[in-house]
Image: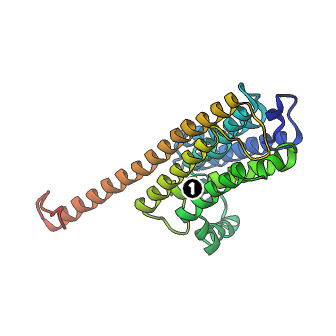
Amino acid sequence: MGSHHDHGGGQPGGAALLAAGLALCGAAGYLLAAARLRRRGDRWPAVRDLSFGAGAAALVAAALVPLPGGPFTAHMARHLATGMAAPLLLVLARPLTLALRSLPPGPRRPLLAAVRSRPAGVLVLPPVAALLDLGGLWLLYRGPLFAAAHARPWPAALVHAHVFAAGLLFSAAVCGLDPLRRRHGVVPRAAALVAAGGAHAVLARTLYTSGPPGTRYAPADLAAAAELMYYGGDLVEIALAAAVAAQWYAAGGRRLAREDRRRARTGEPPGSASYGQ
């Protein structure tokens, strides 16, 4: 996910090719694991395959495809694809659930132990994941890191890798779809999403007139990049909010179904439960 395109095009560098190759390998591994589940008769929705494939495609495009606009606008498009859109699409595909269901017992045990370990539990706390994600972006764009790494492909690739990993962690913490150490409630996840969305919007506004320290971009390029960051971030955050809301709605439906079954067993007439309790 290197910086070669940010300087106006050219052939993809080694870092970009590596990033694209890893994304393609991940997609191939996911599809093979899903096919293995289906061969043995297990159900795995095809929409998850599509979601993972779209996330991998976004990563490949961010690494290899020259984008229109000024250099900072193109960089910001890659940031949105790598750090927000692709992580959400990958998380919605539930890759950890797929791995745990498709792996044999030997490899499954250490993977399950790792994802349910105490350090993993701390990382997926919604406030911690939000701080790692948005805090990293503030350090990148409002400190000297961007200028220091921007002109060197491999340091820039490491920065993009961190942006991707932090975005993946945040999406996983907010969505709460895979079997993590603990499933957090809707309220803390929604609160972390609102706080992160606010911090992202404020950061975008600061970039409207002032680029990262040590860089010089044209005012029109800065304005376009800031608008892309602001409105593009809003779209991804709305999608995250929809995922949380869908879980809340589904949990409410399951709770009502349990109440109906309980009333059927006890002979209690439907609708007799007090909603004020």
Q: Is residue 57 visible?
A: no
Q: Please provide percent x and percent y for residue 196.
A: 53, 53
Q: Is residue 243 above or below residue 108?
A: above
Q: Is residue 131 above or below residue 245?
A: below
Q: Please provide percent x and percent y for residue 188.
A: 45, 62
Q: Please provide percent x and percent y for residue 170.
A: 58, 55
Q: Residue at x 67, y 28 (%)?
A: 220
Q: What quarter of the picture does the N terminus occupy?
A: top right
Q: Is residue 36 visible?
A: yes
Quadrant in the picture for residue 261:
bottom left
Q: Residue at x 73, y 35 (%)?
A: 72
Looking at the rendered structure, the kind of residue marked 1 is Ala
- Residue toward you, 210 or 92: 210
Q: Residue furthest top?
A: 68
Identify residue for label 1: 172
Q: Residue at x 60, y 60 (%)?
A: 131
- Residue toward you, 189 or 135: 135
Q: What quarter of the picture does the C terminus occupy?
A: bottom left
Q: Residue at x 16, y 68 (%)?
A: 266
Determine whether the residue tagged by mark 1 lies in a helix, strand or loop.
helix
